[in-house]
Image: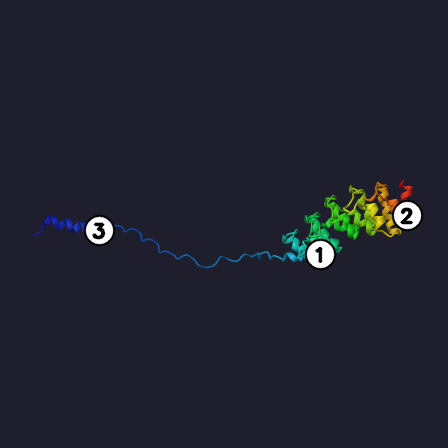
Amino acid sequence: MIGERAIVALLAAFVLGACSPQAPSAPPQTAPSTAPPPASSQPPRQGVPVSQLFEADVNRVRQAVDAGADLETRDDHGRTPLLVAVTENRVDVAEVLVKAGADPNALDGRHDTPWLVTGVTGNVPMAKLLLEAEPDLTITNRYGGVSLIPASERGHAEYVRLVASSGINVDHVNDLGWTALLEAVILGDGGPRHQEVVRALVAAGADVNLADKQGVTPLAHARAKGQTAVARVLTEAGAR
């Protein structure tokens, strides 16, 4: 039989257990949310096709520039947007591109650059714009000529006056052995425009006696072609 003391001990243990405080239960676990984060209040920046840089619309070109389009991207002929703008006499577009940092010396597949093309077009506002970008005036075209030479051939007198005073070599000789002065006489018509070109070159310090590969001087060419007015300008400048 269980003794009286054992019974008392069991009863005490029972009472103590019933009266002891219980440990707090852990809070229920909450499942992680699968809802997407709230959408941004700012829409993502939309890109523009790089071909937009070649367009004639200055606003669309500016939009492409502002969107970070590559200014030196090329078309199928290896031309940059700036070279195309210069070729097509789009001064407003060229200004946007130049101010954005477009390269005036970028060569295309025909060995033309934006700067060299100004000598072909004779566009004076365009030339002034590109001069601000400090183009390399020594780069030559596929004939070995600087921009002054095709300008002289085409009778772009105002362009010649501008560029001849810009630090370009007025006596540069191309692959044919011709200077700008020789080109103006040999390929010019001796009319008023080419007379003005010759005057501009003389005023810029061109060597009036620098002969071609055959030793023929500008004055001799002018006389042979019957360019009386041109010959007079050269003679007055000391040509022989």
Check the image and tell me how it is coloured. rainbow
Q: Are marks 2 and 3 in contact (CB under 8 Å)?
A: no
Q: Quadrant of residue 61?
A: bottom right
The residue located at (91%, 48%) in the rendering is 229
How far apart are labels 2 and 1 at the CA level? 48 Å
Please report whichever mark, 2 or 1, sits nearer to the chain's N-terminal start: 1
Q: Which mark is residue 17?
A: 3
When asked about the image quadrant of residue 48, the answer is bottom right
Query: Which residue appears farthest toward the front when viewing the image?
Result: 214
Which residue is pictured at 69% across the width and 54% down the height?
81
Mark toward the viewer: 3 or 1: 1
Q: Is residue 122 left or right of residue 97?
A: right
Residue designated by label 2: 223
Q: Nearer the viewer, residue 57 or 142?
A: 142
Which quadrant does the C terminus fall into? top right
Judging from the image, what secondary structure is the residue with disc 3 in?
helix
Q: Position of residue 199 (x, y in %)?
A: 87, 45
Nearest to the observer: residue 201 or residue 240:
240
Q: Amino acid at mark 3?
A: Gly
Q: CA distance from mark 2 to mark 3?
A: 133 Å
Left or right of 50, for residue 209: right
Q: Nearer the viewer, residue 21 or 29?
A: 29
The image position of residue 222, as x and y in percent, is 88, 48
Q: Are marks 2 and 1 in contact (CB under 8 Å)?
A: no
**How far from the left and from the top, in percent, is residue 84?**
71, 55
